[in-house]
C-alpha cells in the first residue's frame, strides 16, 4: 500500500520563480551581463543552481567569471529566497489532509541543501520532517540518491512510495529509482512540455485536489 510521498520543491510545492529570477538578475547586473526574463529562468531551472547560472550567462562554463557569478547568486538567494516565494494554492490543505491520512512525506530538490531545509522549515515543517537538497555528499537529481536518502531518513520502503514533481528531471529521477511518478501541471513545465518529455498522460494532475484524489485511488488499488 502506498504510504510515502516524495515531493519535488520548486514548481511542485512552492512557487519560487520570482525569487530565483531576482537572484539571477542581481548576479547578472553585478557583472554587467544582460538580465533574464522570468520565462527564460522558468525554462532554465530544474538541474540545480550551477546549471541555472551556466544557462543564464554568455559562454556558460567558459565564462571566466562563472564561479564568481554563481557565488553572487547563491549569497543573494540565501538572503532573499523567501521574499516572493509562496506555496501554490491548495498545497497547505493538501499536506494537512495527507498528514491526517497517515502519509509519510519528504522533499528532494536540486536547490542547494541549506535553502531546501530553510524553506521547508519556513513553510512545511508541521507536515514534512525530511528535506534534502544538493550537496557535496549526495548526487543531485536525476540520480536517485536524494530519494534513497529521504526514504532512509523516513525509515520507509521504496515499494510503498510515489514521487511527485513538475519537470522532466523529476520523471527521470523517479525512473532511476524506480518508483511511480505523478507529474503536476501547475509548476515550471506545461502539460505539453511534460508530454513531449515522455510523461504519462494518465499520471498528470492539474491541481492539488486532483493529486489528493489520484493518491487516494492509488492507495485503494494497492
Image: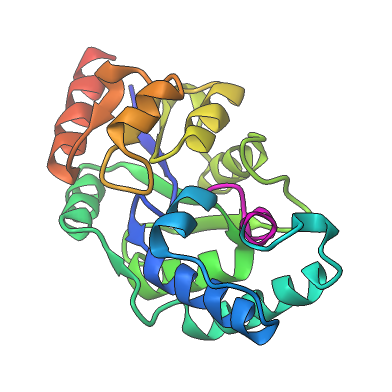
Tell me the quadrant of the picture where the C terminus can be found.
top left
* Numbered range of the magenta stretch: 46-55
Quadrant containing the N terminus in the rendered view: top left
58 vs 39, left or right, is right
Q: From this viewpoint, is residue 16 visible?
A: no
Instruction: Report how many numbered discs are placed on residues in the image.
Output: 0
> Would you say the magenta stretch is mainly helix, strand or loop?
helix
Residue pictured at 34% horizontal, 65% vertical:
124
Would you identify the image quadrant in which residue 129 lies?
bottom left
Q: Is residue 18 visible?
A: yes
In the image, residue 78 sits, relative to residue 161, either above or below, namely below
Q: Position of residue 83 (x, y in %)?
A: 38, 82
* Image color mode: rainbow
Q: Residue furthest top?
A: 221
* Rendered position, 202 above or below 177: above
At horizontal 33% and vertical 61% (from top left) the residue drawn is 15
Q: Residue placed at 32% from the left, 48% from the top?
A: 187
- 15 on left or right of 81: left
Q: Residue 26's spot in the image, x, y percent?
A: 56, 82
Q: Position of residue 141 (x, y in %)?
A: 62, 41
| Residue located at (62% from left, 63% from top) | 113
Q: Judge left or right: residue 196 versus residue 172.
A: left
Residue 154 in percent (x, y) is at: 51, 46
| Residue 161 belongs to the span the image colors magenta | no
Amino acid at each position: 500500500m502506498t504510504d510515502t510521498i516524495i515531493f519535488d520543491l520548486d514548481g511542485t510545492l512552492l512557487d519560487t520563480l520570482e525569487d530565483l529570477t531576482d537572484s539571477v538578475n542581481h548576479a547578472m547586473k553585478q557583472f554587467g551581463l544582460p538580465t533574464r526574463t522570468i520565462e527564460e529562468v522558468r525554462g532554465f531551472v530544474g538541474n540545480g543552481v550551477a546549471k541555472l547560472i551556466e544557462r543564464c550567462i554568455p559562454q556558460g562554463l567558459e565564462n571566466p567569471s562563472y564561479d564568481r557569478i554563481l557565488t553572487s547568486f547563491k549569497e543573494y538567494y540565501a538572503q532573499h529566497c523567501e521574499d516572493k516565494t509562496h506555496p501554490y494554492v491548495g498545497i497547505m490543505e493538501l499536506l494537512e489532509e495527507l498528514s491526517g491520512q497517515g502519509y509519510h512525506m519528504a522533499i528532494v530538490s536540486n536547490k542547494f541543501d541549506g535553502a531546501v531545509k530553510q524553506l521547508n522549515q519556513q513553510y512545511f515543517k508541521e507536515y514534512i520532517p525530511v528535506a534534502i537538497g544538493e550537496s557535496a555528499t549526495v548526487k543531485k537529481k536525476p540520480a536517485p540518491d536524494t530519494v534513497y536518502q529521504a526514504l532512509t531518513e523516513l525509515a520507509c520502503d521504496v515499494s510503498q512510495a510515489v514521487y511527485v514533481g513538475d519537470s522532466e528531471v523529476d520523471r527521470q529521477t523517479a525512473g532511476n529509482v524506480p518508483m511511480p511518478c505523478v507529474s503536476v501541471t501547475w509548476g515550471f513545465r506545461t502539460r505539453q512540455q511534460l508530454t513531449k518529455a515522455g510523461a504519462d498522460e494518465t499520471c498528470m494532475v492539474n491541481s492539488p485536489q486532483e493529486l489528493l484524489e489520484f493518491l487516494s485511488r492509488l492507495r485503494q488499488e494497492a
